[in-house]
Amino acid sequence: MNAGRFFRRLGLDTQYVLVGFPLGLIAVVLSMALFWAGVGLAVVWVGVPLLAVTFFAMRGLAIMERARVGPVLGHRLPHVAYKRATGGGFWRRAVTPLTDGQSWLDLLHAMFRFIPATIAFSVVLTWWTVAIAGLATPLYDWAITNSPDSHGLPYLLGLGDSIAMRWAFNIAIGLFFALTLYPVVRGMALLNTAFAQLLLSRFGELREQVAQAELARDTARAQKDAAVSAEAVALRRLERDIHDGPQQRLIRLAMDLGRAEQQFAQDPEAARATVTEALTQTRETLDELRALSRGIAPPILVDRGLTAALTAVAGRCTVPVELVAPGIERLDPAVESAAYFVVAESLTNVAKHSQATAARVTVRQSAGRLLIEILDDGVGGAAIDKGHGLAGLEDRVRAAGGEFDVFSAAGEGTAIRVALPV
């Protein structure tokens, strides 16, 4: 530690301790007087507003102390969220601080902070006084009366009573206190900050951790619900597509083959034509099944990665699509699958509903996220309605822990922006 930083730290710690003593006295007098007056008058309801004033005053002192602790520790104490009144009404606002745990801790800190403040003030003042007085002995020794009846501490210890001995003894004591001044002052400052941290921030940090844990739990629950919803939507869509497509073709194929079997005996040419038509139906059914399989697990996505799969999707779209996906490396399969289906479903919606003449898909990685943007110049007006395609896409993205936003003003096209964690 260089000299400038050393003296700055010593000055900050000394100032913190010395100023803390009068502030502690003010806090204990104010808190005791207001609190017990409020308790005594609570039976006639006059004390309730007085208690509310007490807690707000203690909150102000606590905020001041958190600000004072910051320079000593080298970092600001975290902001504490106090309980707020829900709804209006004077009495509700007056009673709310009485039900807030941090408000009570602020009160306890104000009542008892004078104990560590007094100890620290006494020690620091003593150390500074002895250090300065001992080292400055030659400057003021001329003012000491050297009468035969006045003997210093060296004389009482049997070390003699000469001026040189008195100077040496006092300077030695001053030097000891000066050399130990920094650790002593620092220790007393940290004693006060530890007491302040214990009551003014630890509870708030614990409450913040609990709030974050609850938020994480709610997020996980929302992701689970979104995953279940997305899976249900996907299964219903697959069932509908199979029912409307391959299933109907297979029924017709069975009927055609049954008719051909009856025609073989009487009209072989008609039977041959029926079989040819059945073969055509078989090929079309296979094509539809391949298309459905691409929607479930496209092989190109597994084999060649997201960029190749998106290139294939963009190429199949009936609306011209510009794909911008520079340097996308292989990602977690769940992320690649979510990104693929977002783009595929969005381009399907563009082709079916947007009346667009062009679309643009941008995919890039940034700050640990995969950012996807699908733009079109269509009629706009798209919205996330429950049971519709965009709602299913949102559920799929939420299930992957991502964010899904749609901007689609009427007549201004549609912009879908997705951020997936990678």
Image (spheres, rainbow, N blue to C red):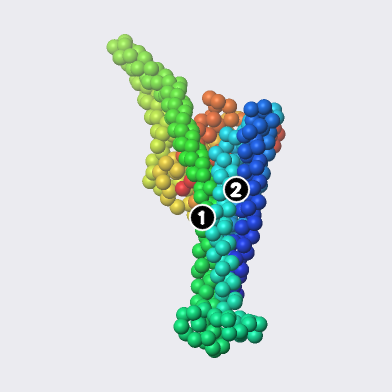
Disc number placed over residue 55 in the picture, else none? none
Q: Residue furthest front?
A: 149
Residue 216 showing in the rendered view: no
Among the two numbered marks 1 and 2 on one chain, the one whose residue lies closer to the N terminus: 2
In this picture, residue 203 sits left or right of residue 353? left
Dot 1: element:
helix
Q: Position of residue 122 (x, y in %)?
A: 56, 63
Give the residue drawn at x 46%, y 36%: 217
Q: Position of residue 205 (x, y in %)?
A: 51, 46
Q: Position of residue 78 (x, y in %)?
A: 57, 50
- Closer to the camera in the image, 241 or 91: 91
Disc number placed over residue 110 in the picture, else none? 2
Give the residue drawn at x 35%, y 13%: 259
Give the residue drawn at x 62%, y 38%: 36
Is 412 rendered above or below residue 106? above
Q: Position of residue 38 (x, y in %)?
A: 65, 35
Dot 2: element:
helix
Q: Pointer 1: residues within 10 angstroms few (<14), some, or many (20+)?
A: some
Q: Pointer 2: residues within 10 angstroms few (<14), some, or many (20+)?
A: many
Disc number placed over residue 194 in the picture, else none? 1
